[in-house]
Image (cartoon, grey):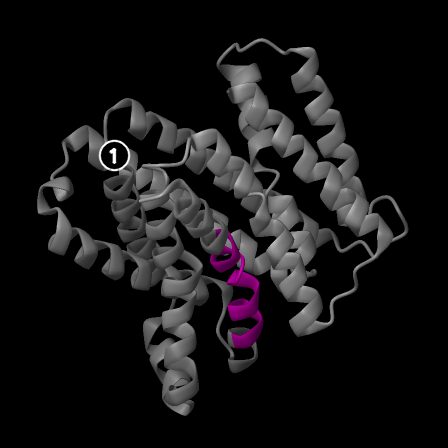
């Protein structure tokens, strides 16, 4: 694969990952809860990725007992991240929810400094300060925007949970597990946990009221927001350096904000724009530190 094509696939995957808010906004009015939408995403993604590996590389599905424990932990964090993220969208704007969740690298940085005894360098301190100012503007604490406590609370929890997933994912990579294997088992766990809490009979009843509309949306929240873009992203990493891919992934929150403005007429205020720029700048700074 040519590098230009790989870069294009990463950009496409970022725009696809960003569609979560669209599906949440479309499914919500039909009566589906955040936990049910989390189950949809987990189950559809788990089935898709499992079938893909069965057809392309069955051996990668073999794992050790230690691997099972790591995958259960990563799946639990991914479940919490999606659940809190979808819940946040019920209280606040898509833009606020996605940007605050995208602050996850800051939480990983703080965890590494506090518990893994990594050095707190001037660059890290600057990144934290820039991130905090950006979060204050995006959340509405500063800048005159409307502040919704529960929306901000759940969005921050989503970021913390996603940071936990990232930390476990690093442990999985250190143990030599293929990223596709790790993600497949992660979503299997997520689907099982969310499905056990989602009141499946109620979901079936809701789907039965408008199946021609809801079945495509349910497939979409699993395929378009997760399984397909993840496959594109993973394939591209064989050609594109991880650092470059991380920088291109910054497109995702920007795309989510564009969707929220275009499709749902959410306000695009100056404090929000400044806050988004600051948060993404901090994430970029952290990505440079890692390299």
Residue drawn at 21 percent across, 37 percent down: 68
| Residue 229 visible, this angle | yes
* Residue 146: % across, % down: 83, 57
Magenta span includes 202: no
Look at the image and tell me in which quarter the N terminus lies.
top left
Residue at screen point 58% across, 71% down: 25
Judge left or right: residue 272 versus residue 191.
right
What x and y, as percent, mark residue 96? 69, 53
* Residue found at x 39% / y 45%: 6
Q: Which stretch appears magenta?
A: 14-26
- In this view, which residue lies farthest toward the right? 144
Question: Main SS type for the magenta part?
Answer: helix
On screen, residue 115 versus residue 165, left or right, reads right
Quarter of the view holding residue 66: top left
| Secondary structure at numbered mark 1 | helix
Q: Position of residue 265 (x, y in %)?
A: 73, 72
Disc 1: which residue: 69
| Residue 22 lies in the magenta-colored region | yes
**Measured along the vertical axis of the image, is residue 265 above or below residue 84?**
below
Can residue 154 be seen here? The reply is: no
**x, y percent for residue 270:** 86, 52
| Residue at figure coordinates x 57%, y 63% from the top left | 21
């Amino acid at each position: 694969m040519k590098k230009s094509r790989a870069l294009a696939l990463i950009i496409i995957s970022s725009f696809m990952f960003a569609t979560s808010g669209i599906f949440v906004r479309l499914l919500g009015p039909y009566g589906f809860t955040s936990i049910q939408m989390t189950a949809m995403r987990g189950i559809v993604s788990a089935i898709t990725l499992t079938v893909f590996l069965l057809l392309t590389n069955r051996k990668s599905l073999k794992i050790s007992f230690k691997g099972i424990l790591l995958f259960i932990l990563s799946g639990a964090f991914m479940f919490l991240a999606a659940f809190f993220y979808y819940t946040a969208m019920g209280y606040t704007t898509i833009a606020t929810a996605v940007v605050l969740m995208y602050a996850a690298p800051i939480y990983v940085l703080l965890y590494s400094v506090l518990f893994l005894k990594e050095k707190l360098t001037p660059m890290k301190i600057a990144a934290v300060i820039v991130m905090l100012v950006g979060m204050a503007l995006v959340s509405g604490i500063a800048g005159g925007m409307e502040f919704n406590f529960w929306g901000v609370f759940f969005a921050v929890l989503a970021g913390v949970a996603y940071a936990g997933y990232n930390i476990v994912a690093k442990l999985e990579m250190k143990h030599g597990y293929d990223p596709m294997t790790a993600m497949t088992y992660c979503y299997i766990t997520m689907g099982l946990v969310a499905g056990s809490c989602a009141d499946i009979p109620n979901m079936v009843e809701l789907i039965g009221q408008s199946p021609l509309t809801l079945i495509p949306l349910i497939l979409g929240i699993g395929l378009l927001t997760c399984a397909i873009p993840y496959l594109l992203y993973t394939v591209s990493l064989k050609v594109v350096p991880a650092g470059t891919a991380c920088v291109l992934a910054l497109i995702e929150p920007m795309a989510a904000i564009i969707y929220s403005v275009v499709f749902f007429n959410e306000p695009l205020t100056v404090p929000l724009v400044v806050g988004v720029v600051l948060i993404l700048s901090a994430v970029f700074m952290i990505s440079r530190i890692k390299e």
